[in-house]
Amino acid sequence: MIGFMNVFSQRQDILWEKIWEHLQISIIALVIATLISVPLGLWLTRKHRIAEPIIGATAVLQTIPSLAVLAFLIPFFGIGQTPAIIALAAYGLLPILRNTYTGIKEVDPALKEAATGMGMKSFRRLSKVELPIAMPVIMAGIRTSMVLIVGTTTIAALIGAGGLGDLILLGLDRGGDVNLILLGAIPAALLAIILDLILRLFERTSAKSGFRSLVSLLVIAALIAVGPLAFGGKVKNDITIGAKLGAEPAILINMYKLLIEEETDLSVGLQKNLGKTDLVFSALQEGSIDIYPEFTGTAIVSLLDEEATSNDPQEVYQQAKEGMAETFDMAFLEPMEFNNTYAVATTQELAERYDLESIGDLKPVENQITAGFTLEFNDRQDGYQGMKEVYNLDLGEVRTMDPGLRQGAISSGDVDIIDAYATSGYMVDLNLTVLEDPKNLFPPYQGAPLMKQETLDRYPEIEDALNQLGGKITGDKMREMNYEVDFEDRSPEEVAREYLINEGLIEE
């Protein structure tokens, strides 16, 4: 409890900012879902033949994993709040649509006949008789949709939409930091409860005020959602730099920003924690970001779908650079020195117990080993799939998990080995043993700025600025900086600035 209160005290400012972002995204999505579902539900009460197929189609939307929907929308709408709101609105359609349709259909037929007998046409009967009676049911659907949307909004942080999911992702990335996770999860739950109570009041008054209750709700929600826009939007930057999840990408993009703004007149914005490789690369292709740090091995294996033709770092870089230019018309600037290659790591205790020194030593005990791999590593040819072929391994149990959960899993003994990155801070914190890779399964992974060629053509001055990092930052130094961010709670911007000042690349 004391730890949680300390984290709360340290991050109060960002917490309130994230709560507001979460509320704004959720309310906009709810308003859109309501404006679509209520009219559609009313129309379907007059079109019985197509009612069930359309309602069924909205039900299918809810079966699609939210992350898949977000990934699908990135090529069309980029990253940020727009695709998040579209996805959340789609998830919120079903409860409102179904309750609107059901509420109208369950109005007493005798009342409908009486209204018709009084000379009311279909629309007048709907507005004066059916809709007021059905409003409590419709409002109940809106309540259900609101709770669903608020809960799902946390995942929108993966595409730079903000909200309380940012704090949860940060906690996961720092080895399952429970206090940070709770700092995001508890306000999200409280927000859902508070909004549910407010909507319950509207639901009760709707029995008397009818359609006016819904109109009032939508007007208030719209004012809350779009009110801040009246005071000006975000400043448009010349360059937007994105990053995957983790301390290392966050440190590197802050270095890029500081160098570009030191050496040029360009303004730079940052979008961190954008998820895994596919999401960030899609954002680069679509144009939501202009630059992001990518690794040479990842470019070859994941983006170009090739195998590294060499284990020499310079040759691997040339292969990645030429391949990205030819296939995607993208520029890969000079790589840094450190090699953040994949590694298979275990505890010193397990390594001593089974006499493990290399990956091949796992073969005699493969049925006794439980592995904790990320989904990406488990599926990659330069990951577990390659381990099975190159080292003839078939581990007894493989549990896939989020990257931030691996260190907690091996620390608690839930898994015996994990995939790791050579420069990760937790390698220092947990004193893990890295198994040697004598057959060179893992190619070199040197980080370098990746961007569209047209971006470099438009702003050629950024090449000299960013190439100042070429050949710099040793593996030990990168590991040390990651440790400072992940375990000493220093900000990525502070760590990046300190390094650049010490290297004489920017002025203090």
Image (cartoon, grey):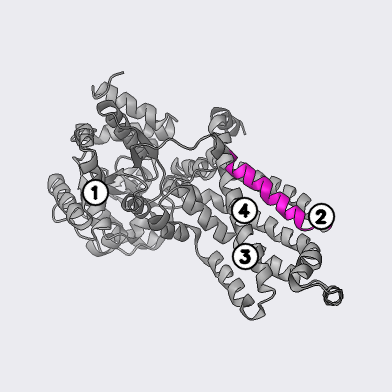
Residue to which mark 1 is pinned:
436
Q: What element carries label 3?
A: helix
Which type of secondary structure does the marked residue at label 4 adopt? helix
Between tags 2 and 1, which lies in front?
Answer: 2
On residue 31, the disc is 4
Tell me the chief SS of the magenta region.
Answer: helix
Q: Give the range drawn in magenta.
A: 208-227
- The verdict on residue 225 being magenta is yes
- Coordinates of residue 417 in the picture (x, y in percent): 37, 52
Indicate the position of residue 112 as horizontal and vertical percent values: 82, 74
Q: Which of 201 and 323 is in front in this view?
A: 201
Real-space Cα separation, disc 4 to disc 3, in angstroms: 14 Å
Image marks 1 and 4: residues in contact by CB distance under 8 Å: no
Q: Which amino acid does label 4 sit on?
A: Val
Say which label, 1 or 4, has the lower sequence index: 4
- The answer for how far apart the CA atoms under marks 2 and 4 are is 20 Å
**Marks 2 and 1, the one that precedes in the sequence:** 2
